[in-house]
């Protein structure tokens, strides 16, 4: 029996790593820091996800020369205010005088919008938000009719409804981009969303005042941060303030 080719092994490794982003969050997870001399990039995952959801992106950006800090946070256990305080504490510990960029997924984008008000004016760099519910979530609104199920989202997730979302807009002086997906691989919520959606968030929900760029790609909500095109666009925007 012949041994698997190098390309086959590489493909298998890529698929395994892609599935690895689905690993569950655990209380003992700590920030995963990859040291480098470049600017700092803070990575924040979404609701009910773990830091592993952003780890392929963190690894990619580190290989581009960035000092990456992949932060786990209790997305479904703590109020948004406590989450912001916890994340802020980690960022403060990384103070090195260099700009601090953000790459976020879903709820991580809302955390960042709240967090910016607490950072020194000269510290924030650029922001790339992947599939953020910037205008709130239709799904959360629908769950108002199912309180026991909504409770599983925790206090932070419950605040993502369109009627209660009150995160500040993005500062005009900060370069920011949003990348949304329009491939819906989760059929459960399609009937609640606009025609263009990623299975969890409607495309139009990602829009917010103050953006420099807004893109829609053929990708889904779960794996958007692992897409090579998304990684390349993110790296380019962090470096140049534009995705191409």
Image (spheres, rainbow, N blue to C red):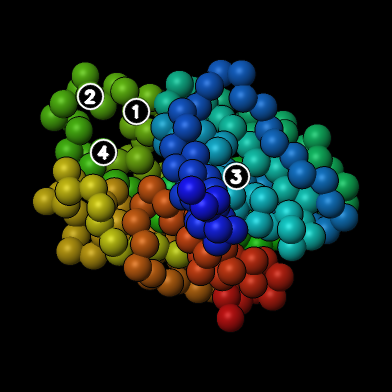
Instruction: Name the residue carrying label 4.
Output: 140
Q: Secondary structure at mark 2?
A: helix
Q: Are marks 1 and 2 in contact (CB under 8 Å)?
A: no
Mark-to-mark CA distance, 2 and 4:
10 Å
Q: Could you tell which of marks 3 and 2 lies nearer the N-terminus? A: 3
Q: Residues within 10 Å of mark 3 (few under 14, many from 20)?
A: many
Q: Could you tell which of marks 3 and 4 lies nearer the N-terminus? A: 3
Mark-to-mark CA distance, 3 and 1:
23 Å
Whole-percent x, y for residue 138 in the image: 23, 47
Mark-to-mark CA distance, 4 and 1:
9 Å
Q: Could you tell which of marks 2 and 4 lies nearer the N-terminus? A: 4
Instruction: Name the residue carrying label 3.
Output: 55
Quarter of image, res 150: top left
Q: Secondary structure at mark 4?
A: helix
Mark-to-mark CA distance, 1 and 2:
8 Å
Q: Residues within 10 Å of mark 2 (few under 14, many from 20)?
A: few
Q: Is residue 100 above or below residue 126?
A: above
Q: Secondary structure at mark 1?
A: helix
Instruction: Name the residue carrying label 1.
Output: 153
Number of the label disc, if any, that sits on residue 149:
2
């Amino acid at each position: 029996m012949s041994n698997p080719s190098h390309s086959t092994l590489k493909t298998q490794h890529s698929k395994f790593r892609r599935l690895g982003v689905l690993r569950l969050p655990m209380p003992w997870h700590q920030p995963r820091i990859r040291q480098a001399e470049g600017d700092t990039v803070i990575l924040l995952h979404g609701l009910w996800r773990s830091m592993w959801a952003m780890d392929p992106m963190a690894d990619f950006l580190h290989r581009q020369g960035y000092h990456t800090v992949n932060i786990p946070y209790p997305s479904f256990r703590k109020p948004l205010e406590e989450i912001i305080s916890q994340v802020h504490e980690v960022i403060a510990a990384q103070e090195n005088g260099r700009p601090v960029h953000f790459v976020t997924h879903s709820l991580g984008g809302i955390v960042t919008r709240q967090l910016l008000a607490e950072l020194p004016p000269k510290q924030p760099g650029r922001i790339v938000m992947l599939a953020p519910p910037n205008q709130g979530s239709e799904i959360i609104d629908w769950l108002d009719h199912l309180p026991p199920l909504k409770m599983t989202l925790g206090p932070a997730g419950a605040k993502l409804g369109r009627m209660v979302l009150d995160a500040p807009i993005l500062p005009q002086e900060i370069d920011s981009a949003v990348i949304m997906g329009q491939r819906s691989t989760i059929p459960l919520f399609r009937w609640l969303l606009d025609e263009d959606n990623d299975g969890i968030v409607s495309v139009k929900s990602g829009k917010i005042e103050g953006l420099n760029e807004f893109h829609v790609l053929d990708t889904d909500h779960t794996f958007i941060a692992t897409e090579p095109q998304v990684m390349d666009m993110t790296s380019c925007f962090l470096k140049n303030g534009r995705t191409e």
